[in-house]
Image (cartoon, helix red, strand yellow):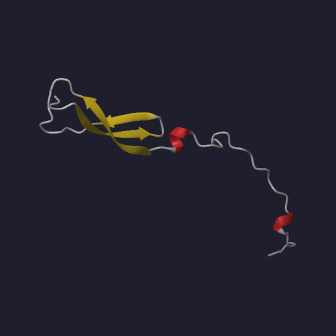
Amino acid sequence: MKEGPYVDPSSAPSRKQHANDAIPAIAPKWLKYDRQCLKFFAYFQEPVVEDANENFRIRKCIIFYYLDDDTFHIIEHRVENSGIP
């Protein structure tokens, strides 16, 4: 077994790194915010003109804002015996 002279790795010629065009430098929004959403609890006041006993109703809802595609999803839960069909 013949041993050659020791070569310092820092003095060896280095290969130039090529940029990979398939991987973007900045992650796209749909990939960066995948499966992430913001949840807001909200309410609004609705006027009531049909009944003389009440002037307005407070209606509660939940708002989901999806970060990946800028869409909203609004949910209003059913309230028993509220008079709203």
- Judged left or right of residue 47, residue 66 is right
Q: Quadrant of the N terminus?
A: bottom right
Percent x, y of residue 5: 87, 72
Residue shown at 23% from the left, 34% from the top: 57
Residue 72 in which image quadrant: top left
56 is higher (above) or lower (below) than 13: above
**Taking 81 as reference, is 39 left or right?**
right
Q: Quadrant of the rendered structure where residue 22 is?
A: top right
Relative to residue 15, is residue 5 depicted above or below?
below
Dividing the picture into quadrants, the one containing residue 83 is top left
Where residue 4 sits in the image (x, y, percent)? 85, 72
Q: Quadrant of the C terminus?
A: top left
- On screen, residue 29 versus residue 5, left or right, reads left
Q: Residue at x 31, y 35 (%)?
A: 44
Residue 80 vs residue 46, the one in the foreground: 46
Which residue is drawn at the image coordinates 16% and 23% (left, top)? 50
Q: Nearer the viewer, residue 3 or 17?
A: 17
Give the residue displayed 85% in from the left and 62% down from the top: 12
Foreground of the two, 34 or 20:
34
Camera-side residue: 83 or 17?
Answer: 83
**Location of residue 46 in the rendering, given as x and y in whole percent from the top left corner:** 27, 30
Left/right of residue 7 with respect to residue 61 in the rendered view: right
